[in-house]
Image (cartoon, grey):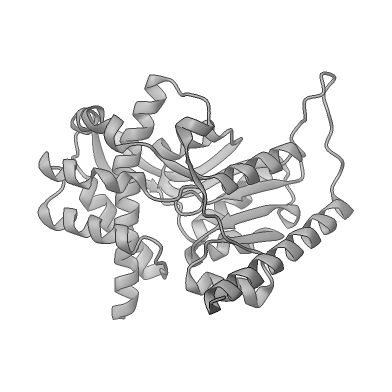
Amino acid sequence: MSTDEVRDAADVQRADTQRADAQQRESEFLADVEEDSDGAQRINNKVAAFFDLDKTLLAQSSGLAFARPFYREGLLGRREAIRSGYAQLIFSLSGANDKVTEGLRRELSRLVTGWDTDTVRRIVNETLGEIVDPLVYIEALDAIDDHKARGHAVVIVSASGSDVVEPIAQWLGAHHWVASDLEIEHGRYTGNITFYAHGANKSAAMRQLADTHSWDLASSYAYSDSSTDIPMLEAVGFPHAVNPDSDLRALALERGWPVLKWTRSVSLRERLPKIDRKTGTQLAISAVVIALLWSWTRSRSKRNITAS
């Protein structure tokens, strides 16, 4: 058995032990799940499970697949197309301080300003069947189902735009979502980001939701792959590192957080109910515009940190 296999086996055993301990501790202070008269479970008002999207629920960024047709149609220049391809290779890299985060906001604004949504829609409609088939981890769907079965509120928390996060969250059966907001006026992106759901902004939005719905964050769960989401993980009592980057992996092992390895992906179309045409188009367009841009700017963040 190789060193990596021994380490992975040890991590799996450690994660199983920690997860069992977490569930035992949870049962000590959580109320039993109530049931309606027809037996349907209600959401436990105390507990929420927060899931990051890309590289946590989704096995990859589907939006990056549209770099080539975007380049052909002139939405992306040659440099942006090359960089988006590079972003696919280093998609899992992370790290951003406040200065870099603000730089990402400016870069995102610059890149999308003036994009015509009708052009994006046409490109998507022409290539949808070939390119867009978002993949999710089976283990992620099982985790969502488990939390819902225990009456927990399920929340998707993502730096991607609300247009992509909302339909995915609804498709997955999540109760709430947190996402970035990109402004659209007269069919074009203005370049104004009204809310950037990244880093500490994620945890702030989680706390606001918790206050609104009277959730006990100390009793709640969070799942992410990236060290940029450490504030999100620290906001809850039961954080989980999923396929973590090196920095998050080290921190998780140091603090005794479960380290999960999710490897089995499945097409959403095979596992989940079909969505209507309007929602499907919205999902595809948003995946093109937002997932591509976030993945590309995430790679910029790592390069800037390395250079600093």
88 shown above or below 47: below
Instruction: Identify which residue, 19 or 182, lies in the foreground.
Output: 19
Is any part of residue 139 visible from this angle? yes
138 shown above or below 34: below
Residue 275: image location, x then y, percent = 46, 24
Is any part of residue 103 visible from this angle? no
Residue 158: image location, x then y, percent = 47, 49
Residue occupying image coordinates x 29% and y 38%: 131
Residue occupying image coordinates x 44% and y 43%: 135
Residue 134: image location, x then y, percent = 41, 40
Instruction: Identify which residue, 9 or 229, lies in the foreground.
Output: 9
In the rendered view, does 133 fall on the left or right side of 153?
A: left
Residue 36: image location, x then y, percent = 82, 23
Residue occupying image coordinates x 23% and y 32%: 127
In the rendered view, does 247 fall on the left or right side of 206?
A: left
Q: Quadrant of the C terminus?
A: bottom left
193 shown above or below 268: below
Instruction: Identify which residue, 257 or 187, lies in the foreground.
Output: 257
The number of callouts visible is 0
227 shown above or below 290: below
Q: Quadrant of the N terminus?
A: bottom right
